[in-house]
Image: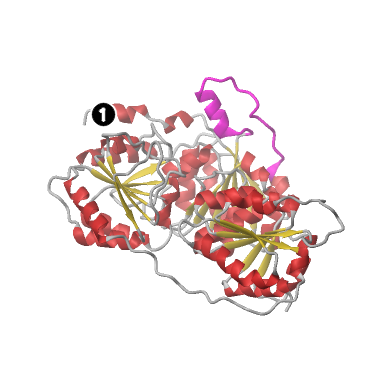
């Protein structure tokens, strides 16, 4: 058997459905072996996009997405996506080609040490030097990528190894039970919660993996403890819940921090310091219980007094058995904060000024999308508005990245989400800057016959950085640009282009595009003049004496 054929067999054994990427000369044997496989090749227009798609598949499915590139520039284009998957805990396996390692007539043309390059960005990186080792290397890559904390893995397949004759061998995949937290730690945690006066529950990205959603909902229903989430923890619990305080979209000074600062105990479920910490720990300050699949990474701002390490769902179920509502718990302050926050969030939902306010866009998207509809966000100031103002009803229905937070991800992530969930409505929300970084993937979406909508928020600038520039007192410089005519640009790919000229048209146009087959691009001018309202000092003033 040829080594490249064996490689494909091992990927089939791992349950791989798709390979996203761009093959090159060094992958031709691998590509020829893939031709007869049930695995589908999703040819993209840039390797970075392929990596974003593979990471998104891993995020949604809980098993590694796979992407492919050639050597040199193809592999270096995967670097950003590798960092995205690694920081965001998304299981992904990258396969790259390489020149023959035993004898090559091309010297070092295009040769970069990809294995060493990937080392700080992955959980596992390995060059195959013997085709008979393919089954064990592939199994190890998938195991490492999947196990907590999930992340990126990389395998390099040189051109001459791919053509070797090898023995057929496949490693069985043995499911392993997730570790259960120690009873002693769970008991200590229950005691800390019982003795606290104003506990508060924080839900992070780790709770968006596995089966934690139902357990956490039951925990809140039984205890009556209020909760908030990080950006990547959105949707774990239906955010229409009466005890939901909001999303921590910033590190500090956001209105949700009024509640955080009053808590005497934070039950921190599934969050780590890779994502912006929604609170800063100080010695003698608020106590913290760390509940996660892995132990806490010690940081200047995070050193929990108790760590309960193990499967999150099992830990929460045990806490439910040990806890009940305590008569001395006082949640009156949280109740007041919730009323203030809800009123603040809804303030501009019906404002029809044009260019349109981001709050109004959030309201329109939430009104139009069904509960299981998926919004994918690129990275810009609108990400904060969506994180704060958009209520997620189900897990992984607002896909944003608050770990690496790379621009250019919105459209590729939407394509992957639509491939995984072809029957769900999928909307990509992109700034004009982020959209243009990987806009070539419109061709990919059209070639795959996807039904997809892309909403471009057009301010002809790098809005997030421009806001920071102004906030820090710098003069406006270097952040403005011009754009193509996005309607004509969409049509040049064969997509349908739309332009909204007044806010009152927005809901109807979104509804029309989401319910019409094909790829749709909607261009809308956005008004970021109220960005300073993200930081509402008045709420702090009104509640500081409570």
Residue 217 counted in the magenta span:
no
Q: Position of residue 470 (x, y in %)?
A: 53, 24
The quadrant of the picture occupied by the N terminus is: bottom right
From this view, report whether residue 64 is shown above or below residue 384.
below
Q: Considering the numbered disc 1 on the image, is that residue within a helix, a strand or a loop?
A: loop
From this view, report whether residue 11 is shown above or below residue 225.
below
Residue 469 counted in the magenta span:
yes
- Give residue 37's quadrant in the image: bottom right
Looking at the image, residue 40 sits to the left or right of residue 309; the answer is: right
Q: How is the image coloured?
A: secondary structure
Q: Position of residue 461 (x, y in %)?
A: 62, 32
Residue closest to the eye, 112 or 512: 112
| Residue depicted at x 64% and y 44% | 435
Q: Is residue 515 visible?
A: no
Chain part drawn in magenta: 460-486
Task: Name the main secondary structure of what is drawn in magenta.
Answer: loop
- Give residue 98's quadrant in the image: bottom right
Q: Position of residue 545 (x, y in %)?
A: 22, 28
Q: Position of residue 120 (x, y in %)?
A: 58, 48
Q: Which residue is mark 1?
A: 544
Q: Residue furthest right?
A: 105
The quadrant of the picture occupied by the C terminus is: top left
Residue closest to the eye, 291 or 535: 291
- How many numbered discs? 1
């Amino acid at each position: 058997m040829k080594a490249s054929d064996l490689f494909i067999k091992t990927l089939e054994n791992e349950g791989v459905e798709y390979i996203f990427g761009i093959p090159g000369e060094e992958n031709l044997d691998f590509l020829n072996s893939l031709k007869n496989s049930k695995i589908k090749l999703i040819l993209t227009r840039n390797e970075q996009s392929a990596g974003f798609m593979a990471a998104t598949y891993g995020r949604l499915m809980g098993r590694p997405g796979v992407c492919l590139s050639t050597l040199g520039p193809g592999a270096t284009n995967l670097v950003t996506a590798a960092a995205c998957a690694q920081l965001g805990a998304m299981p992904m396996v990258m396969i790259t080609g390489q020149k023959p390692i035993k004898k090559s007539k091309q010297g070092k043309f295009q040769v970069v040490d990809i294995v060493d390059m990937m080392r700080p960005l992955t959980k596992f990186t390995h060059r195959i030097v013997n085709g008979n080792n393919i089954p064990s290397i592939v199994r190890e890559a998938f195991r490492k990528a999947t196990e907590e904390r999930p992340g990126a893995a990389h395998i390099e397949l040189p051109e001459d190894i791919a053509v070797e004759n090898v023995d057929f061998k496949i490693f069985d995949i043995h499911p392993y039970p997730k570790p259960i937290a120690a009873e002693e730690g769970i008991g200590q945690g229950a005691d800390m919660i019982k003795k606290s006066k104003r506990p508060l529950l924080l839900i992070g990205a780790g709770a968006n993996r596995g089966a934690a959603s139902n357990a956490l909902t039951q925990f809140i229903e039984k205890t009556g403890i209020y909760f908030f989430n990080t950006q990547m923890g959105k949707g774990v619990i239906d955010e229409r819940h009466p005890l939901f305080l909001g999303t921590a979209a910033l590190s500090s000074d956001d209105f949700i921090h009024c509640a955080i600062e009053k808590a005497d105990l934070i039950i921190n479920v599934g969050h780590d310091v890779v994502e912006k910490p929604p609170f800063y720990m100080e010695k003698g300050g608020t106590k913290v219980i760390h509940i996660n699949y892995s132990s806490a990474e010690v940081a200047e701002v995070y050193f929990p007094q108790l760590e309960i390490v193990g499967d999150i769902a099992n830990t929460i179920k045990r806490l439910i058995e040990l806890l009940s509502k305590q008569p001395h718990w006082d949640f009156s302050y949280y109740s007041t904060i919730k009323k203030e926050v809800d009123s603040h969030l809804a303030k501009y939902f019906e404002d029809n000024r044009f260019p349109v306010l981001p709050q109004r866009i959030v309201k329109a998207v939430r009104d139009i999308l069904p509960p299981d509809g998926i919004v994918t966000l690129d990275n810009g100031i609108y990400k904060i508005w969506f994180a704060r103002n958009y209520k997620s009803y189900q897990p992984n229905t607002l896909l944003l990245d608050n770990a690496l937070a790379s621009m250019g991800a919105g459209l590729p992530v939407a394509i992957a989400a639509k491939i995984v969930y072809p029957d769900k409505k999928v909307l990509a929300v992109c700034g004009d800057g982020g959209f243009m970084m990987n806009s070539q993937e419109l061709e990919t979406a059209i070639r795959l016959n996807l039904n997809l909508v892309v909403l471009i928020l057009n301010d002809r600038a790098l809005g997030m950085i421009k806001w920071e520039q102004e906030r820090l007192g710098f003069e406006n410089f270097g952040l403005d640009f011009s754009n193509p005519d996005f309607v004509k640009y969409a049509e040049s790919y064969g997509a349908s282009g739309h332009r909204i000229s007044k806010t009152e048209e927005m809901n109807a146009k979104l509804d029309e595009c989401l319910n019409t087959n094909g790829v749709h691009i909607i261009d809308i001018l956005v008004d970021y003049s109220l960005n300073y309202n993200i930081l509402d000092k008045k709420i702090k003033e009104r509640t500081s004496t409570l």
